[in-house]
Amino acid sequence: MTDSSSTYSTPVTESDVVSATNNVYICLITLELGSIAIKYQGLTSNPFQEHIASLLIFLVATFCHVVGLKATNKNLLATIIRHFSGVIACEALLLILVAQLFRICQCALLLW
């Protein structure tokens, strides 16, 4: 007799892995953008106008990430581009978020 409530595991496909890693990058980017919005809430300065280089790096990395996702040939190069650009996009937003801390560390190293 077979039990009708038993579940069978389905094999994990490459598209499942791509979707999961894409969701991780989207979650990180959303959290970082939300943190930037909270940090600069009520201030007259715009963090994206102050950090043009980081914003451009973020936009280019996001574009490359989307191109890597939409690649029809899922080879090693597309995977590397997708992951590398996702990490760079997250790091660019992180640089905007901790820019003041970075400047303080630079000054401390210069004075040391």
Image: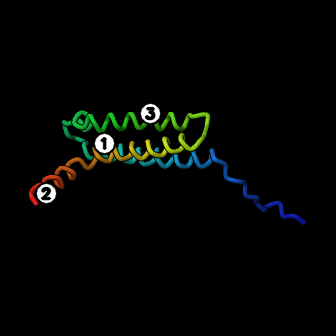
Left or right of 45: which side holds 20? right
The picture quadrant where one finds residue 63 is top left
CB atoms of marks 3 and 2 within 8 Å: no
Query: What scheme was used to colour the molecule?
Result: rainbow
Query: Residue flagged by tag 1: what amino acid is it?
Result: Ala
Instruction: Tell me which numbered mark, 1 or 3, is placed earlier along the sequence.
Output: 1
Q: Residue at x 73, y 58 (%)?
A: 9
Q: Which residue is mark 3?
A: 63
* Disc 3 secondary structure class: helix
> Within 10 Å of the Cα at label 3, are there few (<14), some (14-19), or many (20+) other Cα atoms?
some
Left or right of 65: which side holds 32? left
Image location (x, y in percent) of residue 88: 39, 44
CB atoms of marks 1 and 2 within 8 Å: no
Q: Residue furthest left?
A: 111
Query: Residue flagged by tag 2: what amino acid is it?
Result: Ala
Compared to 86, does 104 lie above or below?
below
Image location (x, y in percent) of residue 50: 22, 36
* Disc 1 secondary structure class: helix
The picture quadrant where one finds residue 64 is top left
Image location (x, y in percent) of residue 67: 51, 33
Compared to 8, does 76 lie above or below?
above
Image location (x, y in percent) of residue 44: 19, 36
> Within 10 Å of the Cα at label 1, are there few (<14), some (14-19), or many (20+) other Cα atoms?
some
Whether residue 92 is visible, yes or no, is yes
Between marks 1 and 2, how big is the CA–CA gap?
A: 28 Å
Q: Which residue is mark 1?
A: 37
* Disc 2 secondary structure class: helix
Instruction: Tell me which numbered mark, 3 or 2, is placed earlier along the sequence.
Output: 3
Query: Residue flagged by tag 3: what amino acid is it?
Result: Phe
Q: Which residue is mark 2?
A: 108
Instruction: Tell me which numbered mark, 1 or 2, is placed earlier along the sequence.
Output: 1
